[in-house]
Amino acid sequence: MDDFLVFGKTIADPWNRVCSLDKPIILFVEFCQIIGPRPLFSYPEDACLNHLLEELSLWLMSSDNFHGNFTSAYNQQLGVYVLTQYATMLDITARALQRPFALSLVLPQQKPTPEQILIFRQISMEILLPLLSCNRYYIHSMLTFASKLADNCEKTNFQSYYSTSGNVQQIVVLSSKIKEIMLQSKSWYDRFLVKMTGFEEITNTNCTCECKEEDFRKFIRILCWKQMAQLVDLMELAPCAGKNYFNILKNAYNQFIKQQKLTVEGLMFSGNMPVLRSVFGANSQKEFQEQEKSEEEENNNNNNNFIISSYSLQKDENTLKSLSFRLLRCVYPLLTGEKIVILASQQRTPTGMDLLEKLNKLRVVKRTENVQWTSEIERLEQVITEHQLSGVSCDKELSLNLSDKNAKHEMIIIDLNNHRIKCREYRGFLLRQLAGKRAFPSDESVMDFVVSVITDINQLLILSKYITPEVVAKSLELTKQDKTILYNLLIEFNLAKYIRMKAKTKDILNKVPYKLLPF
């Protein structure tokens, strides 16, 4: 598993062989006394297999399951962290008049942060309090109805009162059941009435659910059974708040995802992950959120010059996956600071922009930088001067001339029109894991894999900081190509201290010839 280790992340496993989930899910579980624990709702629905949800439900029931408890636990077998809020709904047909359930947030791999715990607790209270409030009002009206029914049973003949039943034995059983329910509820009913007075202020709801005679007949049928075989649906115990509860959970999940601040701390970043951190706490915080376009970006877009922000990752294209055979040839110039230009026709411009954005994410930087795509070939020299990564829209014939290995331009060219790459030869061992053919399921998995390799390389910066780059290169017997990677990363790490390395890097690169390789 050495290929999957990433600093600051327990396991970078793009094939999901360790964790059973690839994204968080929200789970609503009922601990039914008849058929056992069962998942009632889960969102997203396609995020987890049903048998895993059932396994999670059983595991949640075996935890600290009592009303009002909030827990954070780790399931080692499934490799997930679970935040759980336990609660109980009242039901006159259930054992001890209680129907326990749990609302859980299942997080893959990474331990929940204090901010995530706080956000989920707030959201769980917002969606559970109205449900519990509605259930309490409904059960209150049901007990009131049952109390009146029990009084009438004592004053009049029960068989004549409920003559539609036609079963004397069943009527006797029903009468004793109602008396038993009233006896069980007597101990907590007075406290229940006192607490109900403040429910409206807490939940901001005006629930007026009442148990009518037609509703009570459903519970009478269950009470008359000699052996309990079925209970009413849990959401029927809260008639108004339980309607469309799946949509409520869906909105709560989206609210949780939206409220999270996607921030990471570190000294150097690649693929939106910290690849180098300070053990002394001198880390900078990097936030990855969609930003509004500035006026300058809008003006550039109107002039056919597209400024591409490095905050979102498109999932409809797998451009990196298609280049996985030449992954080494793309990553090596990124780490050495060479200029990279992507050439694509007008029809393939979206594909070229997607590849440009993802390569920009893989750059090892302290701060995220934007890249530019232009459709004006005469602006190529200016764009290359301003950006390390850039793209140009051009026809197939022009891209052939630009990507020729004898062309005067000193830059790496990825020609999407002719499916070839102009690159330098690499001979070293720091990036040897990227050599050869590998099958990746998606571009995200490619990025995770590359970042894991880059993380190992960045540990050499710590050695170079306390010794010298020359001693590190000599001790590890680094090749010339590996030295260019180390020197360029040091320049990005501390420009003022290691600016002298820039000339060395350029001298080494100038001695390495270009090659044209198909992909």
Image (cartoon, rainbow, N blue to C red):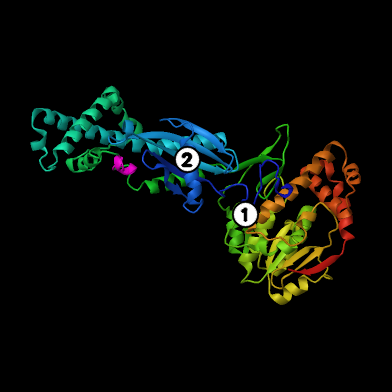
Residue contact at pointers 1 and 2, CB within 8 angstroms: no
Name the residue beneath numbered marker 2: 58
Quarter residue 261 falls in: top right
Q: Which residues are magenta?
A: 228-239
In the rendered image, residue 337 lying in the magenta stretch gets the answer no
Find numbered disc 1 in the image and state the secondary structure of the residue it sits on.
loop
Task: Decide which of 60, 252 is in the foreground and name it.
Answer: 60
Task: Decide which of 364, 94 is in the foreground and name it.
Answer: 94
Task: Decide which of 43, 349 is in the foreground and name it.
Answer: 43
In the image, what residue type sits under mark 1?
A: Ser
| Residue 418 image offset from top left, x and y in percent | 72, 73
Residue 309 numbered mark, or none = 1
| Residue 228 image offset from top left, x and y in percent | 30, 39
> Does residue 238 appear anywhere in the picture?
no
In the picture, which quadrant includes the C terminus? bottom right
| Residue 205 image offset from top left, x and y in percent | 31, 37
In the rendered image, residue 233 lying in the magenta stretch gets the answer yes
Find numbered disc 2 in the image and state the secondary structure of the residue it sits on.
helix
Left or right placement of residue 406 versus residue 389 in this view: right
Left or right placement of residue 268 versus residue 426 in this view: left
**Could you tell which of marks 1 and 2 lies nearer the N-terminus?**
2
| Residue 278 image offset from top left, x and y in percent | 73, 36
Q: Relative to 355, say whether 66 is above or below.
A: above
| Furthest-bottom residue in this view | 397
